Image (cartoon, rainbow, N blue to C red):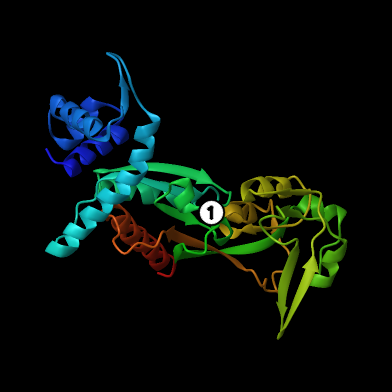
Amino acid sequence: MDYIENLRHFRAVMEAGSFTKAADMLSVTTPVVSRAIAGLEAKLGTRLFHRTTRQMSATEAAERLYERAIRVLDEIDALEADATGHTAEATGILRLVAHTTATVNRLVPLIASFKRAQPKVILDVTLSERPVDLVADGYDLGIVVPYMLSSELTVTRLLERIPQLLVAAPAYLERHALPRDPADLAGHTFVTMSPAIRKQELGFRIGEEEVTVPLNGDVSSNSPMFNRTMILEGFGLGVIPQALVQDELDAGKLVPVLPDFPLMDDAIEIRLAYNTRTLMPAKVRVFIEHAAAFYEALAGADHA
């Protein structure tokens, strides 16, 4: 068995978590996997796994090798597919990070439909609202809002624009006069996104002019869901994605504020992010294609 095949068996063990499960993934016997790992350990001169009759754990050497091996194997698979004109089969673990709030209504149906189409791909999904570096943090892909991307080298593709609205609870407006124009906002309190995420100001388009209003508030967070709840409790005005507050607007629990004055930042962009590679692993390529088709179908249904 050659070195590349040994690396494939090693990768399967790392991703499956056991020799037996790796053998099932590769449609071989467990002794075949054991021999491959033993051969790899002999060649490298180091132990890759601590093994007992009941459990197995990867060594530090194995962790380092795995990070490099997956890149090498993905490149080899893509190179072979490109050379032969065939489409490589999508397999292995796909590590995805997604914005918790922005994808709340999309992620489960997206992942479910992808898994049905690509049953051999294992999904490892992380939900976050913090900035990420796809390479440093070990992600293949991200479904993110722009502020989450900490590297300018990341390739992005627009999936969706979610409208944003300035809203308030009736309880808040009972204590404060309803703003009639942006200038009236100076005396109001806001529930805002954290300053590290968004400037504490709100911009409006008034004819050909752009008017910026500073935001004053006692509560800020990195979560639109949290902010929505605080706004519902009457702690201030806030800009929230429309999809998160549509039910409350329909029920009268929230009301739009200054609806005749368009916001300059009137939508959140949801983007698919991935690393620049000349040869893209099949699992990444098929997810990009699937996600693009999924969001295009959603847009078509919204305009039908």
Residue positioned most to the top? 53
Residue at 27% from the left image edge and 35% from the top image edge: 44
Above/below status of 32 relative to 109: above
Rendered image quadrant of residue 300: bottom left
Nearer to me, 162 or 292: 292
Residue at 31% from the left image edge and 46% from the top image edge: 70
Amino acid, disc 1: Ala
Residue 122: x, y in percent?
Answer: 31, 41
Rendered image quadrant of residue 119: top left
Residue 111 relative to residue 158: left or right: left
Residue 131: x, y in percent?
Answer: 57, 52
Residue at 36% from the left image edge and 58% from the top image edge: 291
Above/below status of 126 relative to 147: above
Residue under label 1:
102
Classify the position of the C terminus by image quarter: bottom left
Q: Is residue 104 visible?
A: no
Q: Is residue 232 visible?
A: yes
Q: SS of the residue at dot 1?
A: loop
